[in-house]
Image (cartoon, coloured by chain):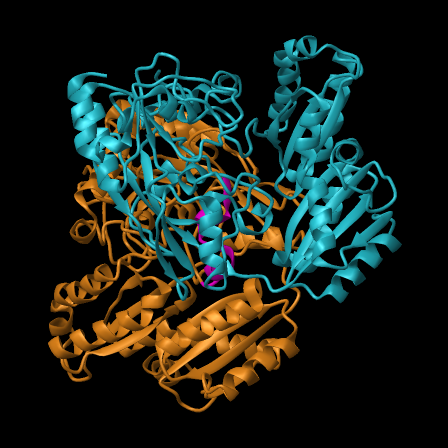
Chain colours: A orange, B cyan
Amino acid sequence: MSDTLAARLVEAVGAANVLVDAADTAPFLTDWRGRYRGAAQCVVRPGNAGEVAAVVRACIEAGVAIVPQGGNTSLCGAATPDETGRAVVVSLGRMNRILAVDRQNNTISVEAGCTLAAVQDAARAVDRLFPLALASEGTCQIGGNLSTNAGGVQVLRYGNTRELTLGLQVVLPSGELWDGLRGLRKDNTGYDLKHLFIGAEGTLGIITAAVLKLYPLPKTQTTCWLNIASPAVAVDLLNQAKSTFDAQLTAFELVSEASLALVLQHIPGATRPAAASPWYVLAEFSDADPAAVEGWLGEQMAAGAVADGVIAASEAQAKKLWALRENISEAQKIEGVSIKHDIAVPVSRIPDFLSTADAELAAAFPGIRVVAFGHVGDGNLHYNLSKPGAQDNAVFLASQAEVNRIVHDTVHALNGSISAEHGIGQLKREEILRYKSATEIALMQTIRQALDPRGLMNPGKLPGPG
Amino acid sequence: MSDTLAARLVEAVGAANVLVDAADTAPFLTDWRGRYRGAAQCVVRPGNAGEVAAVVRACIEAGVAIVPQGGNTSLCGAATPDETGRAVVVSLGRMNRILAVDRQNNTISVEAGCTLAAVQDAARAVDRLFPLALASEGTCQIGGNLSTNAGGVQVLRYGNTRELTLGLQVVLPSGELWDGLRGLRKDNTGYDLKHLFIGAEGTLGIITAAVLKLYPLPKTQTTCWLNIASPAVAVDLLNQAKSTFDAQLTAFELVSEASLALVLQHIPGATRPAAASPWYVLAEFSDADPAAVEGWLGEQMAAGAVADGVIAASEAQAKKLWALRENISEAQKIEGVSIKHDIAVPVSRIPDFLSTADAELAAAFPGIRVVAFGHVGDGNLHYNLSKPGAQDNAVFLASQAEVNRIVHDTVHALNGSISAEHGIGQLKREEILRYKSATEIALMQTIRQALDPRGLMNPGKLPGPG
């Protein structure tokens, strides 16, 4: 690091917050799963938006790239610097204040470094719900959730992070601070700039604070596990449930028998909630009359759509049902290596996607095991492949590009997305070029170039500079 | 018009769809209220997105500005050309096909020139709700709704037009077609470009088609008229209703006695639903148990929050209650000239806004009459002023700038918006410069310049070129 840059950064954030020793910087130079490794001149930890702006200006002067980082839980390497060691990592973790809670406006204002769990807790403390919920919620930071437009199981009812956001404060690639911290539900005064920064993976600026929407805290929840014959039945059932319960339907997850079997095999204490079935739905209703849910389920069973079903009789039982869904990734990890996909198609095309991708993969890779599950209510599946039992890990992983091609081509043919909720980062930076039109890629690059003409903001992430 | 441009346009859309005669072009050169008048070289009426693209390319070659126009119902002059007569108006009205309805994906794909009512009808035909609802719905076009991010009375439950949109097709200022017609609820593959075009008032391209969200059609609605003492009570009551009914609360409108009195005076058949009160709330619950609404209302009356209340006993009575709210603008028009504002503040600050603005206006303009009503659930009020009874119209209207200053300064001090749902257009182009930071204006202009370097897209609307 040049003496000038070092001096400017120390001036901006204080010497204690400019990390240069390898032991100090190491946790910031690799992602949580250890899939990506990079290097950096240093890691800086600003304490407020003004300090972030000063850091950005120092980096501009030095012509040094900036990698913003939150909880470092990206699944796509979006927050890990490249290997050149030229970049400065800006870690937002010290900026973890809840700035304000406006109970009557149903909003919370938070700094970017708040963990998602801290935001949820602050909402709950005033009898409100912040609905974003993710496996990594204790670690991930809201700034990262915003920058990747995080999803999760409640999107069906409450939308993605994007839909939960009313205002943002952002340090721009110019080092200027844009104050868009407004808690308004209607504001048609020009381009809606916040949407440009949400999901931009830190390439258009550094989100430093946000105003987020809060909702009434549900008073009761009814959780069911439903045996169904096929994904087509799941889609029908979803629409039946929506018609009957509308927004009281707060989750609708699809689980394949192959996914459940892995959980039963590898997760201690997991037990089968009902008879075996090719597919299952885990449905959650909030503030619905339990008798209405029971009646509806009875009708669906009478009509033959649901072969068997369990309504959780207690919160503990509901948690056990949710654990079956939430432990699929963990069980698959224990089982061995896997090739994962985070795809979305129109909800109506879920059955087509599964039948086509399953058949093509079975033909190309005999014995490959499909572990499909996810947010069918959003058209979003985690479509993961486990290797044939006897196959060598390396052989299986060598087929990754070919497997991806089959899965992603199938998604694309259905006008779907190859990254529904995880983003692009480094992981899908080349892959996405196959599926986006040249016009769309050019439009993104035009915007990136206009906002960051120096190409210093998180280079190497998303298609573009670096 | 140059022969070259004329030839290119005729080649693009056919001679019958290039209007040049004054009688033919007149309806396109003034807005529906006749507040804005402009001139144009011609009005072209393309029949599909390819023709729109050809028109844009022809205009680029000729260096001629383009004014996109839908149903021409803008309240801010956003679709009216300037007086120079140099522009070409592109009217989307012929592009009025419903392209697809995907019932199981809960989406509808429509061309930009569909009227809002046509979209609502196509949804209803498959037992679904397209929730956007506006006074002008029979005339306004969905492309215009998208370009202005239209709001309305159902935003509380379903969001603005922006939140109802999944995908867009846009002819860019370069004449290229961007096909983002995707019906996905999750798609994190780069910048969310659709949000850039929504609310951009035609300055970044011409929206030619969209994929919109559908919802279950509510089976029952319960409509109440509630007498309350003050706006502060309305905000409390809103939060009580949200906590109890969550998404079943689908509208929550505030009406002042002054507003109701004008309706009773000027609208034939309008009758007072209950005793007089300083303020009223019109609340609508969808698919809620009517007994639960009744019980809740009883509690609120027992607690003293609601002094008197009526629950509509029939659909006809519900319509009558809604008509009281919907006829306020019409009644105010009959009463005489008025100065109108479309403002938003955080919901919690509605009482502060009203008390401050009312007091400052009363001090500055003795006798001025405040007609305040609107979407209190969204923090959005139509804060209109009628002249003191005896005052001359011209004298009153001469005070408009000063009145605006008081109202908008009050809004700004509460971190609000001076255009909640109507947009900027020509009307607030200068005014908005007072309230947006230089950084925000510059950011908008950077984006506009990057996408439309020639400055040909709807110049003179929003701050920027022209």
- Residue A321, percent from left and from top: 50, 78
Q: Is residue B69 above or below residue A266?
A: above
| Between B272 and A436, the one nearer to me in the picture | B272
Residue for point 70% across, 28% down: B332
Residue A133: x percent and y percent? Answer: 48, 59
Q: Could you say which is closer to the camera, residue B25 or residue B369?
A: B25
Query: Which residue is pictured at 80% across the width and 56% down the height?
Result: B297
Where residue A174 appears, as percent x and y from the top left, is 33, 25
* Residue bounds of the magenta highlight: A153-166
> Magenta includes A164?
yes
- Picture layout, residue A152 above or below residue A454: below
Name the one closer to the observer, B16 or A419.
B16
Which residue lies at the image location 20% right of the left edge and 23% below the top edge?
Answer: B6
Q: Give the residue at the far bottom of this rendering.
A: A275
Horizontally, is B409 left or right of B281 in the view? Answer: left
- Closer-to-camera residue (B432/A173): B432
Does the rendering let one see residue A256?
yes
Q: Position of residue B85 (x, y in %)?
A: 33, 14
Residue B275 shown in magenta: no
Left-right relation of A435 to A106: left
Residue B418 lies, with reference to residue A372, above or below; the image says above
Q: Is residue A456 visible?
A: no
- What residue is shown at x 13% (from left), y 78% (from top)? A363
Q: Quadrant of the C terminus of chain B?
A: top left
